[in-house]
Amino acid sequence: MAVINGERVSIVPQSIAAYLKSAGYNEKRVAVEKNLRIIPRGKWTDEMIGEDDSIEILNFVGGG
Amino acid sequence: MALSPERSARFARQLVIPEIGAAGQEKLQNSSVLIIGAGGLGSPAALYLAAAGVGTLGIADSDVVELSNLQRQILHATDSLGRAKVDSACARIRSLDPDVRVIPHRLFVSEENIGALIAPYDFIIEATDNFEAKFLINDACVKAQKPYCHGGVIRFGGQLMTYVPGRGPCYRCVFGDAPAPGDVPTAKEEGVVGAAAGVIGSLQAMEAIKYLLGIGSLLTGTLFSIDTLTMRSRSVPLTAPCCPLCTNARRAAP
């Protein structure tokens, strides 16, 4: 099981970009942390996530 | 120096807390906090820090008070419409406690002024409403090795994290670069509930108080977020410092 935003989920191995798209995220509005490392936006099409990974999708929140 | 009877009465509910007490109250009295943005987040942060007895507060903002601000920006009132927010804020804080030294900085933060602005203060509250300012303040705090708390709020929820030099990543380590204008919705477009801004701004004040007193756990290396609609909250552990600014700062550290 992978852990995404603190919840255990079953996912097939896929790129971060593919996951964000399938989960309905607007990729311009988030940062992605994989196993406590921030994955730069430019690597999202290559970087894979799978069953052993812990993923955090962090939202840009701009209001003040 | 011992607290006067009047000051002891004012802070009675803090003085009985073992983690604060007279020594802590004196620390707060001798501390200074700069609040950048006298809006939805800066209002509760400034009011609670003033009420807690932080001796010196700086308030930085370039705007004037508008009617649409009053639903959430509780530093300001109807009779302040059209007035500079820093003046409205300073008057409100002085009416709360005339012994707080409050310094208005009526300006829009820029590359040119940010370094001198933050230099005299012990802790910075980043309570701005745009990413350009958020990244500018972050970078300046990292370069100056100055602790600060980032806050953001939209609709029913928000987030905060605290940067303390040597104790975790900065905002840029986590979020990289500012999104292009229009890519992320603003509070003007999507709205914000005043009480939600109150939650986040109050927590920012709490971070400042804990830092100044050296008590408790700070949100260093942690992004706290809450959605008040569902009441789901999370504290996400963050990456080690990794941006070029933090890497340089660490190399320069003794």
Image (tube, coloured by chain):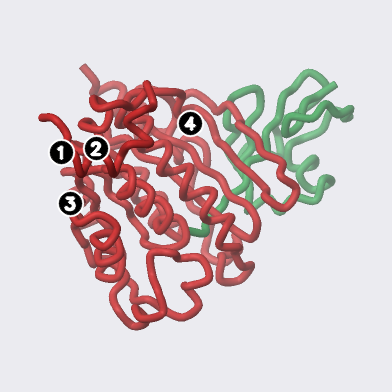
Chain colours: A green, B red
Residue tagged by mark 2?
B8
User: Residue at label 3?
Assistant: B99
Image x and y of residue A39, in percent: 60, 33
User: Could you tell me the amino acid type at mark 1?
Assistant: Ser
Nearer the observer, disc 4 or disc 1? 1
- Whether labels 4 and 1 belong to a single chain: the reply is yes
Residue B110, visible in the rendered structure? no
Q: Are marks 1 and 2 in contact (CB under 8 Å)?
A: yes
Looking at the image, residue B167 sits to the left or right of residue B200; the answer is left
Which amino acid is tagged 3? Asp
Instruction: Tell me the amino acid under the disc marked 2.
Output: Ser
Label 2 and label 4: CA atoms lie apart by 30 Å
- Location of residue B172 in the rendering, given as x and y in whole percent from the top left corner: 45, 40
Specify the label residue B219 is tagged with. Answer: 4
The Cα–Cα distance between marks 2 and 3, rounded to whole angstroms, is: 13 Å
- Circle 2/circle 4 CB separation < 8 Å: no
Q: Mark 1 highlights which residue?
A: B4
